[in-house]
Image (tube, rainbow, N blue to C red):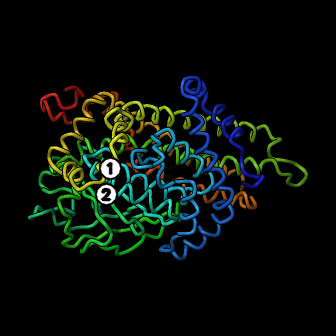
Amino acid sequence: MRQSDPSLGEVRKRLLSDFPMLEEIRRRRPFYVEKLARTVRDCAEYNRRYVLPAALELDRRMEKEHDYFAWDLVEAGLQYRFLSLIIPSTVDGVGGLGVLFSLAMEELCSACPGVANIFGAHALGVAPLLVAGAMAHWESVLREVVEEEKSGRPVLMAAAVTEPSAGTDVEEPHFLKSARLSMHAKRVPGGYVLNGRKCFISNGSVATYTAVCCATDRERPLESWTSFLVHRDMEGFSVPRVEEKMGQRACPAAELSFEDCFVPDEYVLGFEGDGMQPGTLLLLASSRAPVGAIATGIARGAYEWFLKWAEKSKGGRRPIDEQRIKMVLADMRTRIQLARWAYLSAALTIDNSVGSVLLGPAIRSMRLIPKGIRTSDVTRRFFLSTAGKTFSDAIVAVSISSEEASHALAFASLAKAVGGDTAMYVSSLALELMGVDGGEERLWVEKAFRDAKLTQIYEGTNQLNRLTLFMADIGGSLKVELKNPFNPRAAGKGVV
Protein backbone atom coordinates (compact mmCIF):
# COMPACT_ATOMS: atom_id res chain seq x y z
CA MET A 1 0.00 0.00 0.00
CA ARG A 2 1.32 3.43 -0.90
CA GLN A 3 1.87 6.07 1.80
CA SER A 4 -0.93 8.20 0.41
CA ASP A 5 -3.49 5.45 0.90
CA PRO A 6 -5.68 5.82 4.00
CA SER A 7 -5.06 3.58 6.98
CA LEU A 8 -7.81 1.46 8.48
CA GLY A 9 -7.65 3.55 11.65
CA GLU A 10 -8.15 6.78 9.73
CA VAL A 11 -11.13 5.38 7.86
CA ARG A 12 -12.68 3.98 11.04
CA LYS A 13 -12.32 7.35 12.77
CA ARG A 14 -13.98 9.15 9.84
CA LEU A 15 -16.83 6.65 9.70
CA LEU A 16 -17.58 6.99 13.39
CA SER A 17 -17.43 10.78 13.06
CA ASP A 18 -19.77 10.91 10.04
CA PHE A 19 -22.12 8.24 11.41
CA PRO A 20 -22.31 8.55 15.23
CA MET A 21 -24.91 5.77 15.33
CA LEU A 22 -22.20 3.32 14.26
CA GLU A 23 -20.45 3.81 17.61
CA GLU A 24 -23.36 2.18 19.42
CA ILE A 25 -23.45 -0.62 16.84
CA ARG A 26 -19.70 -1.05 17.29
CA ARG A 27 -20.10 -1.75 21.01
CA ARG A 28 -22.31 -4.71 20.22
CA ARG A 29 -20.84 -5.81 16.88
CA PRO A 30 -17.21 -4.65 16.64
CA PHE A 31 -16.33 -7.03 13.81
CA TYR A 32 -19.23 -5.71 11.73
CA VAL A 33 -18.00 -2.11 11.96
CA GLU A 34 -14.46 -3.26 11.20
CA LYS A 35 -15.79 -4.92 8.04
CA LEU A 36 -17.44 -1.65 7.04
CA ALA A 37 -14.21 0.26 7.66
CA ARG A 38 -12.17 -2.21 5.60
CA THR A 39 -14.59 -1.90 2.70
CA VAL A 40 -14.52 1.90 2.75
CA ARG A 41 -10.71 1.84 3.01
CA ASP A 42 -10.54 -0.41 -0.04
CA CYS A 43 -12.81 1.96 -1.97
CA ALA A 44 -10.69 4.97 -1.00
CA GLU A 45 -7.52 3.15 -2.03
CA TYR A 46 -9.08 2.12 -5.35
CA ASN A 47 -10.08 5.73 -6.02
CA ARG A 48 -6.65 7.06 -5.22
CA ARG A 49 -4.70 4.48 -7.20
CA TYR A 50 -6.87 3.97 -10.25
CA VAL A 51 -9.84 6.31 -10.61
CA LEU A 52 -8.67 9.83 -9.77
CA PRO A 53 -5.70 9.69 -12.20
CA ALA A 54 -7.98 8.55 -15.04
CA ALA A 55 -11.49 9.94 -14.46
CA LEU A 56 -11.31 13.27 -16.30
CA GLU A 57 -9.58 11.84 -19.35
CA LEU A 58 -11.98 8.87 -19.41
CA ASP A 59 -14.92 11.30 -19.29
CA ARG A 60 -13.49 13.30 -22.23
CA ARG A 61 -12.86 10.14 -24.23
CA MET A 62 -16.36 8.81 -23.72
CA GLU A 63 -17.89 12.08 -24.86
CA LYS A 64 -16.68 11.08 -28.33
CA GLU A 65 -16.49 7.27 -27.96
CA HIS A 66 -19.62 6.60 -25.93
CA ASP A 67 -19.45 2.85 -26.60
CA TYR A 68 -15.95 2.57 -25.12
CA PHE A 69 -15.72 0.61 -21.86
CA ALA A 70 -12.93 0.83 -19.29
CA TRP A 71 -12.39 -2.89 -18.64
CA ASP A 72 -9.02 -2.05 -17.06
CA LEU A 73 -10.71 -0.14 -14.23
CA VAL A 74 -13.18 -2.98 -13.68
CA GLU A 75 -10.35 -5.49 -13.55
CA ALA A 76 -8.49 -3.27 -11.06
CA GLY A 77 -11.54 -3.47 -8.80
CA LEU A 78 -11.54 -7.26 -8.69
CA GLN A 79 -8.77 -7.37 -6.07
CA TYR A 80 -11.14 -5.50 -3.73
CA ARG A 81 -14.02 -7.89 -4.54
CA PHE A 82 -16.32 -5.11 -5.71
CA LEU A 83 -18.37 -7.58 -7.79
CA SER A 84 -19.05 -9.78 -4.75
CA LEU A 85 -20.01 -7.13 -2.20
CA ILE A 86 -23.68 -8.17 -1.91
CA ILE A 87 -23.30 -11.81 -2.93
CA PRO A 88 -24.04 -14.07 0.08
CA SER A 89 -21.15 -15.66 1.93
CA THR A 90 -22.94 -18.98 1.32
CA VAL A 91 -21.40 -18.89 -2.16
CA ASP A 92 -18.19 -17.22 -0.94
CA GLY A 93 -19.29 -13.67 -1.62
CA VAL A 94 -18.48 -10.77 0.73
CA GLY A 95 -21.97 -11.02 2.18
CA GLY A 96 -22.53 -7.30 2.59
CA LEU A 97 -26.00 -5.82 2.83
CA GLY A 98 -27.43 -2.32 2.40
CA VAL A 99 -25.21 -0.48 4.88
CA LEU A 100 -21.93 -1.91 3.58
CA PHE A 101 -22.86 -1.40 -0.05
CA SER A 102 -24.16 2.14 0.53
CA LEU A 103 -20.97 3.19 2.31
CA ALA A 104 -18.95 1.70 -0.54
CA MET A 105 -20.96 3.60 -3.15
CA GLU A 106 -20.58 6.95 -1.37
CA GLU A 107 -16.82 6.49 -1.21
CA LEU A 108 -16.48 5.35 -4.82
CA CYS A 109 -18.77 8.09 -6.14
CA SER A 110 -16.80 10.83 -4.41
CA ALA A 111 -14.20 10.25 -7.15
CA CYS A 112 -16.16 9.15 -10.23
CA PRO A 113 -19.79 7.99 -10.11
CA GLY A 114 -19.53 6.71 -13.67
CA VAL A 115 -16.89 4.15 -12.73
CA ALA A 116 -18.64 3.46 -9.42
CA ASN A 117 -21.96 2.84 -11.14
CA ILE A 118 -20.46 -0.04 -13.11
CA PHE A 119 -20.27 -1.84 -9.77
CA GLY A 120 -23.59 -0.35 -8.64
CA ALA A 121 -25.46 -1.50 -11.77
CA HIS A 122 -23.83 -4.93 -11.39
CA ALA A 123 -25.20 -5.19 -7.85
CA LEU A 124 -28.62 -4.16 -9.15
CA GLY A 125 -28.41 -7.14 -11.52
CA VAL A 126 -27.41 -9.45 -8.67
CA ALA A 127 -30.23 -8.29 -6.38
CA PRO A 128 -33.15 -10.03 -8.19
CA LEU A 129 -31.42 -13.35 -7.55
CA LEU A 130 -31.51 -12.54 -3.83
CA VAL A 131 -35.11 -11.33 -3.42
CA ALA A 132 -36.87 -13.69 -5.85
CA GLY A 133 -37.25 -17.44 -5.81
CA ALA A 134 -33.92 -17.77 -7.57
CA MET A 135 -31.80 -19.81 -5.17
CA ALA A 136 -31.15 -22.32 -7.95
CA HIS A 137 -28.84 -19.74 -9.51
CA TRP A 138 -26.75 -19.06 -6.41
CA GLU A 139 -24.42 -22.01 -6.98
CA SER A 140 -24.31 -21.42 -10.74
CA VAL A 141 -24.56 -17.74 -11.69
CA LEU A 142 -23.47 -16.13 -8.42
CA ARG A 143 -20.77 -18.74 -7.91
CA GLU A 144 -19.53 -17.98 -11.44
CA VAL A 145 -19.28 -14.26 -10.61
CA VAL A 146 -17.30 -15.02 -7.46
CA GLU A 147 -14.94 -17.58 -8.96
CA GLU A 148 -14.23 -15.53 -12.09
CA GLU A 149 -13.60 -12.46 -9.94
CA LYS A 150 -10.97 -14.39 -7.99
CA SER A 151 -9.39 -15.42 -11.30
CA GLY A 152 -9.23 -11.86 -12.56
CA ARG A 153 -12.05 -12.17 -15.10
CA PRO A 154 -15.07 -9.92 -14.46
CA VAL A 155 -18.56 -11.32 -15.01
CA LEU A 156 -20.89 -8.33 -14.97
CA MET A 157 -24.64 -8.28 -14.42
CA ALA A 158 -27.41 -5.79 -15.16
CA ALA A 159 -31.13 -5.25 -14.54
CA ALA A 160 -33.55 -4.23 -17.30
CA VAL A 161 -36.89 -2.68 -16.38
CA THR A 162 -37.36 0.55 -18.39
CA GLU A 163 -39.02 0.36 -21.81
CA PRO A 164 -39.06 3.02 -24.54
CA SER A 165 -42.64 4.05 -23.72
CA ALA A 166 -42.65 3.08 -20.03
CA GLY A 167 -40.08 4.31 -17.53
CA THR A 168 -41.53 5.45 -14.23
CA ASP A 169 -44.73 3.51 -14.93
CA VAL A 170 -43.03 0.14 -14.56
CA GLU A 171 -41.63 0.92 -11.10
CA GLU A 172 -44.92 1.40 -9.27
CA PRO A 173 -48.01 -0.87 -9.11
CA HIS A 174 -50.60 1.91 -9.52
CA PHE A 175 -48.95 3.12 -12.74
CA LEU A 176 -48.08 -0.32 -14.14
CA LYS A 177 -51.78 -1.07 -14.52
CA SER A 178 -52.05 1.49 -17.33
CA ALA A 179 -48.46 1.51 -18.61
CA ARG A 180 -47.85 1.61 -22.37
CA LEU A 181 -45.76 -1.53 -22.65
CA SER A 182 -43.94 -2.54 -25.79
CA MET A 183 -42.24 -5.71 -24.57
CA HIS A 184 -43.86 -8.98 -23.63
CA ALA A 185 -43.10 -12.65 -22.96
CA LYS A 186 -45.16 -15.47 -24.48
CA ARG A 187 -45.44 -18.86 -22.85
CA VAL A 188 -44.22 -21.70 -25.07
CA PRO A 189 -43.29 -25.31 -24.33
CA GLY A 190 -40.23 -25.34 -22.08
CA GLY A 191 -40.06 -21.62 -21.44
CA TYR A 192 -40.94 -18.18 -22.79
CA VAL A 193 -40.26 -16.18 -25.95
CA LEU A 194 -39.39 -12.53 -25.32
CA ASN A 195 -40.06 -9.79 -27.85
CA GLY A 196 -39.53 -6.07 -27.50
CA ARG A 197 -36.97 -3.60 -26.23
CA LYS A 198 -35.56 -2.25 -23.01
CA CYS A 199 -33.75 1.09 -22.89
CA PHE A 200 -31.28 3.08 -20.77
CA ILE A 201 -29.98 -0.13 -19.19
CA SER A 202 -26.82 0.50 -17.16
CA ASN A 203 -24.18 -2.15 -17.98
CA GLY A 204 -26.56 -3.50 -20.62
CA SER A 205 -23.89 -3.66 -23.33
CA VAL A 206 -21.24 -5.35 -21.17
CA ALA A 207 -23.22 -7.64 -18.85
CA THR A 208 -23.00 -11.40 -19.13
CA TYR A 209 -26.36 -11.81 -17.35
CA THR A 210 -29.30 -9.40 -17.32
CA ALA A 211 -32.35 -9.69 -15.09
CA VAL A 212 -35.29 -8.66 -17.28
CA CYS A 213 -38.81 -7.78 -16.12
CA CYS A 214 -41.73 -7.77 -18.54
CA ALA A 215 -45.39 -8.72 -18.82
CA THR A 216 -46.67 -12.04 -20.11
CA ASP A 217 -50.02 -10.34 -20.76
CA ARG A 218 -49.87 -6.68 -21.74
CA GLU A 219 -53.59 -6.34 -20.97
CA ARG A 220 -52.89 -7.39 -17.36
CA PRO A 221 -49.35 -6.15 -16.73
CA LEU A 222 -49.58 -5.92 -12.95
CA GLU A 223 -50.78 -9.50 -12.59
CA SER A 224 -48.37 -10.90 -15.19
CA TRP A 225 -45.17 -8.92 -14.54
CA THR A 226 -42.43 -11.57 -14.49
CA SER A 227 -38.66 -11.66 -14.01
CA PHE A 228 -36.29 -13.54 -16.31
CA LEU A 229 -32.54 -14.07 -16.39
CA VAL A 230 -31.08 -13.56 -19.86
CA HIS A 231 -27.57 -14.58 -20.88
CA ARG A 232 -25.96 -12.39 -23.52
CA ASP A 233 -25.39 -15.43 -25.77
CA MET A 234 -29.08 -16.37 -25.94
CA GLU A 235 -30.34 -16.34 -29.52
CA GLY A 236 -32.48 -13.30 -30.29
CA PHE A 237 -30.79 -11.02 -27.75
CA SER A 238 -28.77 -8.07 -29.05
CA VAL A 239 -27.59 -4.57 -28.15
CA PRO A 240 -28.59 -2.18 -30.97
CA ARG A 241 -26.93 0.87 -29.45
CA VAL A 242 -25.20 2.47 -26.51
CA GLU A 243 -26.50 5.90 -25.55
CA GLU A 244 -24.46 9.09 -25.72
CA LYS A 245 -24.57 10.38 -22.16
CA MET A 246 -24.13 13.71 -20.43
CA GLY A 247 -22.97 12.30 -17.11
CA GLN A 248 -21.79 9.07 -15.50
CA ARG A 249 -20.33 8.28 -18.90
CA ALA A 250 -18.02 5.48 -17.76
CA CYS A 251 -21.06 3.26 -17.10
CA PRO A 252 -22.78 2.53 -20.44
CA ALA A 253 -26.54 2.89 -20.86
CA ALA A 254 -27.70 0.55 -23.62
CA GLU A 255 -30.78 -0.33 -25.56
CA LEU A 256 -31.50 -4.07 -25.47
CA SER A 257 -33.41 -5.90 -28.20
CA PHE A 258 -35.27 -9.19 -27.83
CA GLU A 259 -36.42 -10.81 -31.07
CA ASP A 260 -38.00 -14.21 -30.45
CA CYS A 261 -35.50 -14.64 -27.62
CA PHE A 262 -36.19 -18.01 -26.00
CA VAL A 263 -35.68 -18.13 -22.24
CA PRO A 264 -36.03 -21.63 -20.73
CA ASP A 265 -38.17 -22.20 -17.65
CA GLU A 266 -35.10 -22.57 -15.44
CA TYR A 267 -34.27 -18.92 -16.06
CA VAL A 268 -37.58 -17.62 -14.73
CA LEU A 269 -36.88 -15.90 -11.39
CA GLY A 270 -39.64 -16.85 -9.01
CA PHE A 271 -43.14 -17.52 -10.29
CA GLU A 272 -44.88 -15.94 -13.25
CA GLY A 273 -46.61 -12.78 -12.06
CA ASP A 274 -44.28 -12.18 -9.09
CA GLY A 275 -42.31 -9.49 -10.92
CA MET A 276 -43.91 -6.46 -9.26
CA GLN A 277 -45.31 -7.89 -6.03
CA PRO A 278 -43.04 -8.54 -4.31
CA GLY A 279 -40.21 -8.60 -6.88
CA THR A 280 -39.67 -5.05 -8.15
CA LEU A 281 -40.84 -3.41 -4.92
CA LEU A 282 -38.41 -5.43 -2.80
CA LEU A 283 -35.69 -4.67 -5.33
CA LEU A 284 -36.39 -0.91 -5.13
CA ALA A 285 -36.53 -1.04 -1.34
CA SER A 286 -33.06 -2.56 -1.43
CA SER A 287 -31.54 -0.37 -4.16
CA ARG A 288 -32.76 3.16 -3.48
CA ALA A 289 -30.66 3.66 -0.32
CA PRO A 290 -27.47 2.94 -2.30
CA VAL A 291 -28.66 5.40 -4.96
CA GLY A 292 -29.01 7.99 -2.18
CA ALA A 293 -25.43 7.10 -1.27
CA ILE A 294 -24.32 7.52 -4.89
CA ALA A 295 -25.79 11.02 -4.92
CA THR A 296 -24.27 11.83 -1.53
CA GLY A 297 -20.87 10.76 -2.83
CA ILE A 298 -21.26 13.07 -5.84
CA ALA A 299 -22.23 15.96 -3.56
CA ARG A 300 -19.29 15.22 -1.29
CA GLY A 301 -16.87 15.16 -4.21
CA ALA A 302 -18.16 18.51 -5.51
CA TYR A 303 -17.93 19.98 -2.01
CA GLU A 304 -14.35 18.79 -1.49
CA TRP A 305 -13.19 20.22 -4.83
CA PHE A 306 -15.02 23.48 -4.14
CA LEU A 307 -13.33 23.67 -0.73
CA LYS A 308 -9.91 23.21 -2.35
CA TRP A 309 -10.71 26.01 -4.77
CA ALA A 310 -11.89 28.28 -1.94
CA GLU A 311 -8.68 27.74 0.03
CA LYS A 312 -6.46 28.92 -2.85
CA SER A 313 -5.31 32.53 -3.04
CA LYS A 314 -6.73 34.51 -5.95
CA GLY A 315 -5.31 38.00 -6.41
CA GLY A 316 -3.98 37.97 -2.88
CA ARG A 317 -7.28 36.88 -1.30
CA ARG A 318 -8.82 33.51 -0.57
CA PRO A 319 -12.53 32.98 -1.25
CA ILE A 320 -12.83 31.02 2.01
CA ASP A 321 -12.00 34.18 3.95
CA GLU A 322 -15.27 35.72 2.76
CA GLN A 323 -18.20 35.29 5.13
CA ARG A 324 -20.60 34.30 2.32
CA ILE A 325 -18.31 31.45 1.21
CA LYS A 326 -18.04 30.22 4.79
CA MET A 327 -21.83 30.13 5.06
CA VAL A 328 -22.15 28.34 1.72
CA LEU A 329 -19.63 25.69 2.79
CA ALA A 330 -21.50 25.23 6.05
CA ASP A 331 -24.77 24.86 4.14
CA MET A 332 -23.25 22.31 1.77
CA ARG A 333 -21.77 20.36 4.65
CA THR A 334 -25.14 20.35 6.42
CA ARG A 335 -27.04 19.07 3.40
CA ILE A 336 -24.47 16.36 2.68
CA GLN A 337 -24.58 15.16 6.27
CA LEU A 338 -28.39 15.05 6.27
CA ALA A 339 -28.37 13.10 3.00
CA ARG A 340 -25.79 10.75 4.51
CA TRP A 341 -27.91 10.09 7.59
CA ALA A 342 -30.97 9.56 5.37
CA TYR A 343 -29.36 6.84 3.29
CA LEU A 344 -27.79 5.14 6.31
CA SER A 345 -31.16 5.08 8.09
CA ALA A 346 -32.75 3.60 4.98
CA ALA A 347 -29.95 1.05 4.63
CA LEU A 348 -30.26 0.01 8.27
CA THR A 349 -34.01 -0.35 7.80
CA ILE A 350 -33.60 -2.61 4.77
CA ASP A 351 -30.89 -4.66 6.51
CA ASN A 352 -33.15 -5.18 9.51
CA SER A 353 -36.07 -6.28 7.32
CA VAL A 354 -35.32 -7.68 3.86
CA GLY A 355 -31.68 -8.24 4.80
CA SER A 356 -32.74 -10.46 7.67
CA VAL A 357 -33.76 -13.06 5.09
CA LEU A 358 -30.14 -13.44 3.95
CA LEU A 359 -28.86 -13.48 7.53
CA GLY A 360 -31.54 -15.80 8.86
CA PRO A 361 -30.88 -19.35 10.09
CA ALA A 362 -32.31 -20.97 6.94
CA ILE A 363 -29.75 -19.31 4.68
CA ARG A 364 -26.84 -19.47 7.11
CA SER A 365 -27.41 -23.17 7.69
CA MET A 366 -26.83 -23.80 4.00
CA ARG A 367 -23.10 -23.33 4.62
CA LEU A 368 -23.25 -26.51 6.72
CA ILE A 369 -24.39 -28.52 3.71
CA PRO A 370 -21.44 -30.05 1.82
CA LYS A 371 -20.65 -28.17 -1.37
CA GLY A 372 -21.10 -31.31 -3.41
CA ILE A 373 -24.73 -31.53 -2.32
CA ARG A 374 -25.38 -27.78 -2.73
CA THR A 375 -24.08 -27.88 -6.31
CA SER A 376 -25.68 -31.18 -7.30
CA ASP A 377 -28.29 -31.52 -10.04
CA VAL A 378 -30.77 -32.82 -7.45
CA THR A 379 -30.49 -29.63 -5.38
CA ARG A 380 -30.66 -27.44 -8.46
CA ARG A 381 -33.77 -29.22 -9.73
CA PHE A 382 -35.40 -28.81 -6.32
CA PHE A 383 -34.88 -25.03 -6.26
CA LEU A 384 -36.15 -24.79 -9.84
CA SER A 385 -39.30 -26.72 -8.96
CA THR A 386 -42.56 -25.33 -7.66
CA ALA A 387 -41.72 -26.79 -4.25
CA GLY A 388 -38.31 -25.14 -4.24
CA LYS A 389 -39.65 -21.71 -5.21
CA THR A 390 -42.40 -22.10 -2.63
CA PHE A 391 -39.70 -22.85 -0.06
CA SER A 392 -37.94 -19.61 -1.05
CA ASP A 393 -41.18 -17.67 -0.60
CA ALA A 394 -41.66 -19.28 2.81
CA ILE A 395 -38.21 -18.12 3.96
CA VAL A 396 -39.16 -14.54 3.10
CA ALA A 397 -42.62 -14.84 4.65
CA VAL A 398 -41.31 -15.99 8.04
CA SER A 399 -38.43 -13.51 8.08
CA ILE A 400 -40.17 -10.18 7.49
CA SER A 401 -43.64 -8.67 7.43
CA SER A 402 -45.36 -6.62 4.77
CA GLU A 403 -45.29 -3.65 7.14
CA GLU A 404 -41.51 -3.90 7.57
CA ALA A 405 -40.89 -4.21 3.84
CA SER A 406 -43.23 -1.30 3.06
CA HIS A 407 -41.53 0.86 5.68
CA ALA A 408 -38.16 0.01 4.15
CA LEU A 409 -39.45 1.03 0.70
CA ALA A 410 -40.69 4.37 2.08
CA PHE A 411 -37.39 5.17 3.80
CA ALA A 412 -35.39 4.13 0.74
CA SER A 413 -37.49 6.41 -1.48
CA LEU A 414 -36.94 9.28 0.95
CA ALA A 415 -33.18 8.74 0.95
CA LYS A 416 -33.00 8.55 -2.84
CA ALA A 417 -34.93 11.81 -3.36
CA VAL A 418 -32.99 13.68 -0.68
CA GLY A 419 -29.65 12.49 -2.05
CA GLY A 420 -30.38 13.37 -5.67
CA ASP A 421 -31.59 16.86 -4.82
CA THR A 422 -28.57 17.41 -2.57
CA ALA A 423 -26.12 16.41 -5.31
CA MET A 424 -27.70 18.85 -7.76
CA TYR A 425 -27.84 21.65 -5.20
CA VAL A 426 -24.21 21.36 -4.07
CA SER A 427 -22.67 20.93 -7.53
CA SER A 428 -24.70 23.70 -9.18
CA LEU A 429 -24.05 26.18 -6.36
CA ALA A 430 -20.33 25.39 -6.42
CA LEU A 431 -20.19 26.02 -10.18
CA GLU A 432 -22.07 29.28 -9.82
CA LEU A 433 -19.64 30.62 -7.20
CA MET A 434 -16.46 29.40 -8.88
CA GLY A 435 -17.18 31.18 -12.13
CA VAL A 436 -15.39 30.35 -15.36
CA ASP A 437 -11.87 30.61 -13.91
CA GLY A 438 -11.95 27.76 -11.45
CA GLY A 439 -8.89 25.85 -12.62
CA GLU A 440 -8.70 22.08 -12.29
CA GLU A 441 -11.16 22.14 -9.40
CA ARG A 442 -13.86 23.52 -11.68
CA LEU A 443 -13.36 20.64 -14.13
CA TRP A 444 -14.15 18.17 -11.35
CA VAL A 445 -17.15 20.16 -10.11
CA GLU A 446 -18.48 20.55 -13.65
CA LYS A 447 -18.24 16.79 -14.08
CA ALA A 448 -20.02 16.27 -10.75
CA PHE A 449 -22.83 18.56 -11.93
CA ARG A 450 -23.36 16.44 -15.05
CA ASP A 451 -23.07 13.22 -13.05
CA ALA A 452 -25.54 14.40 -10.42
CA LYS A 453 -28.55 14.87 -12.68
CA LEU A 454 -28.98 11.16 -13.31
CA THR A 455 -29.47 10.53 -9.59
CA GLN A 456 -32.75 12.45 -9.80
CA ILE A 457 -33.90 10.17 -12.62
CA TYR A 458 -32.84 6.51 -12.30
CA GLU A 459 -34.34 4.11 -9.76
CA GLY A 460 -37.53 6.10 -10.26
CA THR A 461 -37.61 9.86 -10.70
CA ASN A 462 -37.54 11.90 -7.52
CA GLN A 463 -41.17 12.81 -8.19
CA LEU A 464 -42.09 9.12 -8.19
CA ASN A 465 -40.05 8.54 -5.04
CA ARG A 466 -41.99 11.27 -3.27
CA LEU A 467 -45.25 9.66 -4.37
CA THR A 468 -43.98 6.29 -3.14
CA LEU A 469 -43.07 7.86 0.21
CA PHE A 470 -46.55 9.31 0.50
CA MET A 471 -48.36 6.13 -0.54
CA ALA A 472 -46.22 3.74 1.53
CA ASP A 473 -45.82 5.89 4.65
CA ILE A 474 -48.41 8.69 4.83
CA GLY A 475 -51.39 7.59 2.76
CA GLY A 476 -51.03 3.85 3.37
CA SER A 477 -52.23 2.90 -0.12
CA LEU A 478 -49.06 1.06 -1.14
CA LYS A 479 -47.81 -2.07 0.59
CA VAL A 480 -45.25 -4.65 -0.36
CA GLU A 481 -47.26 -7.86 -0.61
CA LEU A 482 -45.28 -10.89 0.51
CA LYS A 483 -46.48 -14.31 -0.56
CA ASN A 484 -47.24 -16.74 2.22
CA PRO A 485 -47.33 -20.13 0.49
CA PHE A 486 -48.97 -21.89 3.44
CA ASN A 487 -51.73 -19.35 3.92
CA PRO A 488 -52.39 -17.30 0.77
CA ARG A 489 -55.01 -15.17 2.52
CA ALA A 490 -52.36 -14.06 4.97
CA ALA A 491 -50.05 -12.85 2.18
CA GLY A 492 -48.22 -9.75 3.30
CA LYS A 493 -48.56 -10.50 7.01
CA GLY A 494 -45.27 -12.32 7.27
CA VAL A 495 -46.66 -15.21 9.35
CA VAL A 496 -47.23 -18.91 8.79
Direction from residue 317 to residue 329 in the image, left or right? left
Residue 279, image x and y in percent? 27, 45
Q: Secondary structure at mark 1?
A: helix
- Amino acid on which disc 1 is placed: Pro
Q: Is residue 466 left or right of residue 60?
A: left
> Which of the marked residues, 2 or 1, is nearer the chain's N terminus?
1
Residue 108 seen anywhere in this rendered image of the structure: yes
Q: Residue furthest right?
A: 316
Circle 1: is it few (<14), some (14-19), or many (20+) Cα within 10 Å?
many
Residue contact between numbered discs 2 and 1, judged by CB atoms under 8 Å:
yes
Residue nearest the viewer, comparing 36 with 492 = 36
Residue shown at the point (58%, 45%) measured from the top left: 39
Q: What's the residue at 71%, 44% (across, down)?
A: 7
Q: How many marks?
A: 2
Residue 113: give x, y in percent of width and height.
55, 55
Could you tell me which quadrant the N terminus lies in? bottom right
* Residue 246 appears in the rendering: no
Quadrant containing the C terminus is top left
Rendered location of residue 89, percent (x, y): 43, 44
Q: Nearer the viewer, residue 230 or 246?
A: 230
- The residue type indicated by label 2 comes to Ala
Decide: is 139 above or below 487. below
The residue pinned by badge 2 equals 211
Expressed as whole percent of the image width and height from the top left, the position of residue 32 reads: 54, 34
Kindly identify the residue that appears in the image at 55 percent across and 71 percent down. 62
461 in relation to 55, above or below: above
Residue topped by disc 1: 128
